[in-house]
Amino acid sequence: MLNLQSLLLGIPALLMAISVHEFAHGYAAHRLGEPTPRYQGRLTLNPLAHLDPIGGLMLLLFRFGWAKPVQINPAYFRNRKRGTLIVALAGPLANIVMAWLFYNLWRLVPGALPTPALRVTADLFLRINVLYNLGLAAFNLLPIPPLDGSKVAVSLLPPKWEYSFAVFSTYGPFVLMVLLVTGMTQRLLNPVLNTLLWLISRLSI
């Protein structure tokens, strides 16, 4: 359960993780010639442009969640499948990079601070940032619509299977809700989170 200090430190960590995630989606699409994110004001790190209240609350309380999706029209991409894949992966990859950055700061910063109170606070804040960024990345990589992982799956599927996946997509939110309510989401995510944490620890400075 979150204590007051974790809750207060978690709010800025949450806002940073969500902002970076959605900005990365929008910027990748923008670089590939898709003007919609720019028209909708999503090429910004301002969290108010990206925050989904329920998804943000889930991330704050359970360390996995989602933000307000960036709307993308694949028709603007020269290669629809490749463009969809790049944009879908941009958000989770940005969070993994952020987790790597905060992991290295966690290893270096707290021990250099002058007082125990500052060391404890910095240690907690940096660890929360690592967990929120990895949680946001891992959750969004699940291949369940409307999460990023479903777009990755679509971009990799052969054309003959796309229709079947599109039919499944209509049930995606219901499947996601069942996973969340039953607690299966945590079971699915734990191996992914542990793998990502191992990876950033191995690649640390």
Image (tube, helix red, strand yellow):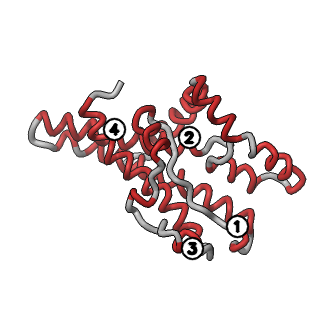
The residue pinned by badge 4 equals 127
Q: Say if residue 199 shows up in the picture.
A: no
Name which residue type carries label 1: Pro
Q: What is the C-alpha distance between the residues marked 2 and 1?
A: 23 Å
Q: Is residue 87 left or right of residue 129?
A: right
List the single residue furthest toward the right: 160
Amino acid type, mark 4: Arg
Distance of label 2 from label 3 (alpha carbons): 25 Å
**Residue 60, image quadrant:** top left
- Dot 3 crowding, Cα within 10 Å, few <14, some 14–19, many 20+: few
Q: Give neighbour class at mark 2: few <14, some 14-19, many 20+ (Cα, 10 Å).
A: many
Q: Is residue 184 above or below residue 75?
A: above
Query: Which residue does the numbered mark 2 point to in the structure image?
Result: 139
Q: Residue at x 56, y 32 (%)?
A: 189
31 to the left or right of 85 = left
Q: In screen coordinates, is 111 left or right of 138?
A: left
Query: Which type of secondary structure does the marked residue at label 4 adopt?
Result: helix
Image quadrant for the N terminus?
A: top left
Residue 49 on image: x %, y %:
44, 60
